Amino acid sequence: MHKLHRRDFIKASLWGGVAAAAIPSHAMKMLDIQTKVTVDAASRVSLVTGVDRADMAFRALQPLSNEIAQAIGNRPILIKPNLVASSNQLAATHKDTIEGILEFYKSINKLNNIIGIGESAADGPTMAAYENYGYMGVADKYKVKFVDFDNSPSKVIWLMDETDLRPKPCRMNALMMDPNTFIMSVCRMKTHDRIIATLTFKNVSVGAPIKDPGFTFDRYRTPGSRTDKQIVHGGGFRGIHYNLFTIAHHFHPNLGFIDGYDGMEGNGPTNGTLVDHKVCVAGLDWVAVDRVGVELMGIDPGEIGYLNWCAEAGMGQYDLSKIEVIGEKVANHIKHYKRHDRHDRMLEWMTPLRQSGQNQYGAPAQNR
């Protein structure tokens, strides 16, 4: 099952059928115009190693300076770190990584384009996370602002829940939804409890949904407050892949960045253990960046459904042989990350939702 060709994945999943049936052909053509990138030529991804986190971040971006500056133009830049947990540094983007990135933008005269470092922390107040991780000093040094998605304008998109197949409204940060925003996704290299690994697109797709300002997971939660992040998870191991594929048609990283200085294996994205990896990956093709990240973690690329579907839809390059890796050789830096305890259950998306012997409604087929 693990070795199924990726072109068979959509055929094997009810969600692929739902996606094709739900979107008219003319609408799909419009989506292709917005999301398709050039994949007939090799996508360029930078891979560096080192012992200084900020220096690695700068050097990973430097070979792509001209392409990044051209892609930005006059657009506003939103830097999206990964602060899923507000008090666990191994689960969150390090301030030194942010400093190296800001120094890079300064070097290409794009520091003034940055409208903010934006996030909606999953477990509590976002500003508390910025403070806990020492972001304030870095922001002051480079004169950049913070954006708290939970206290900013939002827009609604409709996502699916596999438990009842009903569309659900999900509030998303409006800046992330603005096609003029140049989104930089800065994530940690981590295993994940739903979709195998946290990568650049997962970082923006679950960071953009907002929660009410009074929402926390503890006793200090404001009564009646809620979070829309669970809506993205789609009610199960199939729904989350479908929803991430759907979100990718609305927005995605314009610049992907994976900090693997120290990664997390096992029960990520918050309860795993440290992997001393010392790698950093960056590129303008987020699918290609995530593909290199998967390879570096020793993960079967066929196991991550939404990435395969996004590649099938022409959103980026997932064929490693067609990705031009600048700098270090991927093969020299692969570490086989220990999977999450429920890794096998995460592969449920690869099998049909309706089992053989059932009719189209999931009930036992009747002989007539």
Image (spheres, helix red, strand yellow):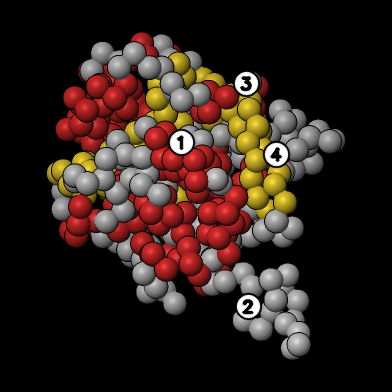
- The image shows residue 157 at horizontal and vertical percentages of 63, 36
- The residue type indicated by label 1 comes to Met
Q: Secondary structure at mark 3?
A: loop
Left or right side of 177 for 110: left
Q: Which residue sits furthest bottom?
A: 367
Identify the image quadrant of the C terminus. bottom right
The tag earlier along the polypeptide, 3 or 1, is 1
Residue 361, by quadrant, is bottom right
Asked if the residue at tag 3 contacts the one at tag 4, i.e. Cβ–Cβ closer than 8 Å, the answer is: no
- The residue type indicated by label 2 comes to Gln
- The residue type indicated by label 3 comes to Ser
Q: Nearer the viewer, mark 2 or mark 3?
A: 2
Kindly identify which numbered label has been placed on residue 169.
4
Q: Residue placed at 75% from the left, 76% from the top?
A: 363
Q: Nearer the viewer, mark 4 or mark 3?
A: 4
Relative to 76, does residue 364 appear above or below in the rendering? Answer: below
- Residue identifier under label 1: 30
How far is the residue under mark 1 from the one under mark 4? Answer: 22 Å
Residue 289, by quadrant, is top left
Kindly identify which numbered label has been placed on residue 355.
2
- The residue type indicated by label 4 comes to Pro
Identify the image quadrant of the N terminus. bottom left
